[in-house]
Amino acid sequence: MQYKIAIGIPSYNEARYIKFVLTQIDRGLKKYYKPSECLIINLDSKSNDGTKKVFLTTKTVCSKKYLETPIGKGRAMLNFFKFCLKRNIPYITTIDADLTSIAPDWMFKLINPLTKGYDYTIPTYTRNRFESNITNHFAYPLLYSMYSVGLRQPLGGEFGYSQKFYEYILKQPKHPKTFEYGIDIFISCNAIAGGFNIQEVYLGKKIHAPSFYHMELTFRQVFESGVFVSKIHRRYKAKHGSIILNTVSSGIDNLKYFPHKNAINRLLKQLRHRFFRYNEAGYYNKYLNQELIKKLKYIIGSSKPNLSGDLWIDVLSNVLKKCYQSNFDIKEISLISRILVPIYRWRAASCWLEIENMTTKETEEVICREARRLRKKLLYH
């Protein structure tokens, strides 16, 4: 069977959600494409909660296949690309397994631009203002400053790829964290730097399983992978392909539901302890100037969640300059990502309180201001 479309669903212990995601994908493919030409694949990282059984026993019109992959989202996706390349499948997408807001028309929105000559479809959503912290404070500012392209959700998870693009991705050098949660930023950076045609597509709201409690792990993996790939791209001037950005939504919804507000004081206490432990060990002296360290000690020492976006970007730009100008090995970049965590999370918590009662437009401006400041700081370095 020659498939024209393949949908990959990376998963790890997603038995609770995957049936809904699979059903919505199947409905969308049935509505907009020929089911006989479509294949849905569960890219499962050795789940032990019955994800495989739920996937295989859910009835679908389209063909489906279960593939067990090594643990790590990036490994699952790269194995998916290899599988599709071997079978010469021209249009593919990846869809997160924990979605509760996916709709059938997402399939058309992600795939249709690929049939019109685009190589990479990347989503924009309206999301809760207290989510997307890694995107808002690192990934989006990094792409905007490095490539002069404001892809608003470079870690979106729901992407479409032409065969030319996913074959290119397989050939690019990778950091160890690219094989984990660092895969999305790696792909988005390469889409721009590789000169591929990109179209943002608006998918409405994104609601998925809570990510608050693994925000630290994900930040470190995204940071290390993002620094690795952007450092490579700094060596040459990227020639952009055709890029169509979405203008439908700011990315922030009107809801002000703040589920982790009560956890802020406990979180800050933990972060303060870690920050001063790292500072006493002399780590910050290696990567930050004394003026920045003094400001951080004052704010974090006072226990007030008022670390501004300007200060965070000053810290981030100093660290990135060090990374770009030095031949740091993987261990050193890992150390940097670890000691940045207390500062990054302090900024995220400060931002939650800063934007709590803002309008969507005001909230979006807070995020965009950080991106503009980082671009200005890195422009001539």
Image (cartoon, grey):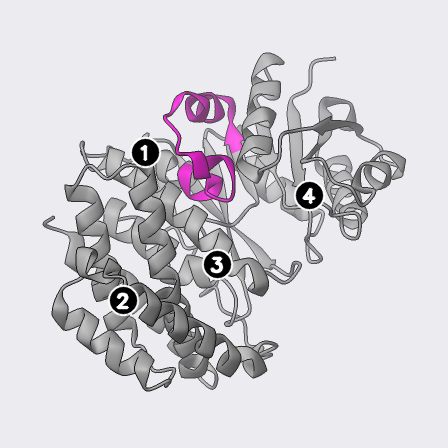
Look at the image and give the residue range highlighted in magenta. Answer: 161-186
Tell which circle, 3 or 1, labels the residue nearer the N-terminal end.
3
- Residue 306, position in %: x, y? 34, 82
Left or right, 159 with respect to 301, comes to: right
Few, some or many residues within 10 Å of mark 1 (<14, 14–19, 20+)? some
**Residue 181 belongs to magenta span:** yes
Q: Secondary structure at mark 4?
A: loop
Determine which of the numbered discs, if any, sits on residue 216 in the image: 3
Tell which circle, 4 or 2, labels the residue nearer the N-terminal end.
4
Secondary structure mostly seen in the magenta stretch: helix
Image quadrant for the N terminus? top right
Tell which circle, 2 or 3, labels the residue nearer the N-terminal end.
3
- Up-down: is 287 above or below 229? below
The answer to which quarter of the image holds residue 40 is top right
Few, some or many residues within 10 Å of mark 4 (<14, 14–19, 20+)? some
The answer to which quarter of the image holds residue 30 is top right
Residues under labels 2 and 3: Cα distance? 19 Å
Tell which circle, 4 or 1, labels the residue nearer the N-terminal end.
4
